Image: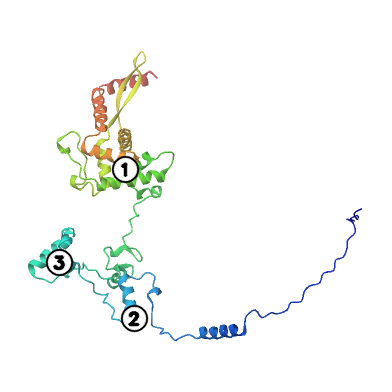
């Protein structure tokens, strides 16, 4: 019969800790060798405090880094203050002359015709940073920064600050944006995503900037653009490009149906003049509606190509504008009839 286990009585179990005995795990020869190596590592060799390694400066130019390496190795460092003129490089490479900018090509021709040595202009491969060169040319006199294009910009400003003396308290910060640009951006917005609309607007302006000059002689047709700049300079001013397209295709009036004038439930079309913002809104809606039928995948590409078509006179927005103006001309006689009806109704009251 197995013994019974009592769960309610505790038994004391003796526990004895083992004494810790230090042990020599390494041989005496290894310990002595390690101590000797530690003593040797603590000894340092004297280093020149004026000596700088290339890693001390993280933003070093490649030529400056090579100069520091040559100075460390005892070699003669290159002269980084005077680089090789670009004209001398182009004279050795005839293939690169064809792809050089026009300014350098003209400088090469002038030097060749006059016999002036190349490198007289500031086109050079020098490793000097622009900040170092600018620090020698720019100086401060009170709040004027002499040496810059805008000396009246003020201390710490590169460009002149805008004149806000004529602004009113109700203007807030609305003067920062072009009105046409802001109105088109708001019209492009879907589901309240303004940042996405602003991105599309930037893509549209970049497409207009890189596009060629719009073809077609718009001055001899009824689809002329209202231009503030020459037609050849439109891609250089994408905001003015967009403004000229919107203002040119914008209608002057809209057709409003006046009910209860003719009797029998018939309505009378009446032309109503529009304000500048209403005209632009109608033109933007027409451009966006015409852009929906294009085959481009991205919305920004469709709108940009449609704006170019409007500038070239090939968009459907021009037909909409002509249709509205023809209806307004045919219905302009209804204005007197409506005004006489209103006068009679006022007198009857």
Say how the picture is coloured: rainbow
Q: CA distance from mark 2 to mark 1?
A: 63 Å
State the residue at coordinates (81%, 72%).
Answer: 16
Estimate how packed mark 3 is, as few (under 14), some (14 to 19) or many (20 or more) residues with alpha carbons within 10 Å: few
Which residue does the numbered mark 2 point to in the structure image?
73
Residue 289 vs 183, above or below: the answer is above
Q: Quick one: quadrant of the C terminus? A: top left
Foreground pick, 39 / 237: 39
Mark 2 lies on a secondary structure that is helix
Picture quadrant of residue 159: bottom left
Q: Is residue 246 visible?
A: no
Q: Position of residue 285 (x, y in %)?
A: 33, 34
SS class, disc 1: helix
Residue indicated by mark 1: 180
Question: Residue lying farthest left?
Answer: 113
Q: Earlier in the sequence, mark 3 or mark 2?
A: 2
Question: Residue 134: where, in percent of width, then height?
Answer: 29, 69
In this rendering, the answer to whether 252 lies above or below 211 is: above
The tag on residue 11 is none
Label 3's element?
Answer: helix
Q: Earlier in the sequence, mark 2 or mark 1?
A: 2
Q: In this figure, which residue is indicated by the disc labeled 3?
A: 91
Residue 142 falls in which quadrant of the image? bottom left
Count of residue discs: 3
Q: Earlier in the sequence, mark 3 or mark 1?
A: 3
């Amino acid at each position: 019969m197995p013994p019974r286990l009592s769960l309610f009585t505790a038994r004391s179990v003796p526990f004895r800790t083992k004494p810790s005995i230090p042990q020599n795990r390494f041989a005496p020869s290894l310990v002595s060798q390690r101590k000797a190596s530690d003593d040797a590592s603590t000894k340092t060799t004297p280093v020149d405090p004026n000596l700088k390694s290339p890693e001390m400066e993280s933003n070093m130019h490649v030529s400056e880094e090579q100069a520091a390496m040559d100075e460390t190795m005892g070699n003669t460092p290159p002269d980084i203050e005077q680089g090789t003129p670009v004209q001398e490089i182009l004279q050795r490479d005839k293939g690169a002359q064809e792809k050089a900018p026009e300014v350098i090509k003209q400088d090469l021709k002038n030097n060749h015709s006059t016999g002036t040595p190349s490198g007289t202009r500031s086109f050079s491969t020098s490793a000097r940073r622009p900040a170092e060169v600018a620090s020698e040319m720019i100086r401060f006199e009170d709040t004027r920064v002499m040496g810059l294009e805008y000396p009246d910009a003020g201390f710490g400003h590169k460009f002149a600050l805008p004149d806000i003396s004529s602004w009113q308290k109700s203007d807030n910060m609305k003067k920062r944006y072009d009105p046409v640009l802001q109105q088109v951006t708001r019209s492009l917005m879907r589901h309240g995503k303004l940042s996405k609309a602003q991105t599309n607007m930037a893509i549209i302006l970049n497409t207009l900037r890189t596009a060629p000059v719009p073809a077609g002689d718009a001055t001899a047709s009824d689809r002329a653009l209202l231009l503030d700049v020459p037609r050849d300079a439109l891609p250089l001013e994408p905001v003015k490009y967009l403004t000229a397209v919107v203002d040119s295709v914008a209608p002057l009036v809209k057709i409003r149906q006046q009910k209860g004038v003719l009797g029998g439930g018939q309505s009378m079309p009446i032309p109503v003049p529009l304000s500048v913002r209403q005209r632009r809104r109608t033109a933007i809606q027409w451009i966006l509606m015409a852009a929906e039928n294009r085959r481009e995948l991205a919305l920004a590409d469709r709108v940009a190509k449609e704006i170019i078509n409007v500038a070239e006179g090939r968009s459907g927005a021009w037909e909409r504008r002509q249709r509205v103006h023809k209806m307004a001309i045919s219905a302009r006689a209804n204005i007197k009839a409506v005004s006489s009806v209103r006068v009679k109704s006022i007198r009857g009251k």
